Amino acid sequence: QVQLVESGGGLVQAGGSLRLSCAVSGRTSSMAAIGWFRQAPGKERSLVGRIFWSGGSTYYADSLKGRFTISRDNAKNTVYLQMNNLEPEDTAVYFCAARLTFRPEYTYWGQGTQVTVSS
């Protein structure tokens, strides 16, 4: 079992920044990657990006490259999502999720944190 808890969401003006945290606990030795996802009202959940747990390699959705950065602190078992130059279209609930080794899907999910960007 892996447990994930997101924090750091809130209300920010357009052009501002936020850093989300994803605290990970449990069987982290079985994890391959942590992904960040978001879901806006009335829209499907979409992948923001992911980071490999051991190597640290990252991937981002094309539309978010340059504004969003994922990093990790393995000593703290925490993954971060730094979001800069935020736009109202970034308003969504943001989730982190864990993908296990040799599994293609994300198995464990956090409860989500709300990010609201005002214009």
Image (cartoon, rainbow, N blue to C red):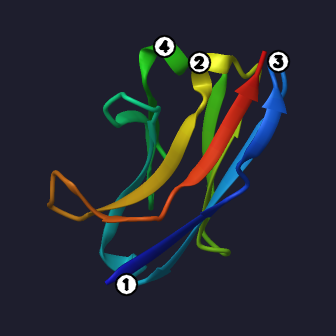
Number of residues whose C-alpha sits closer than 10 Å to that of mark 3, classed few (under 14), some (14–19) or many (20 or more):
some
Q: CA distance from mark 3 to mark 1?
A: 37 Å
Query: Quick check: marks 4 and 1 in contact, CB under 8 Å?
Result: no
Q: Amino acid at mark 1?
A: Arg
Q: Amino acid at mark 3?
A: Gly
In this rendering, the answer to whether 48 lies above or below 79 is above
Quadrant in the rendering for residue 17: top right
Q: Nearer the viewer, mark 4 or mark 1?
A: 4
Ranked by sequence position, the earlier of labels 4 and 2 is 4
Q: Is residue 117 visible?
A: yes
Q: CA distance from mark 2 to mark 3?
A: 12 Å
Ranked by sequence position, the earlier of labels 4 and 3 is 3
Which label belongs to residue 27? 1
Which label belongs to residue 119? none
Q: CA distance from mark 4 to mark 1?
A: 32 Å
Q: Residue 72 location, x and y as percent?
A: 61, 56
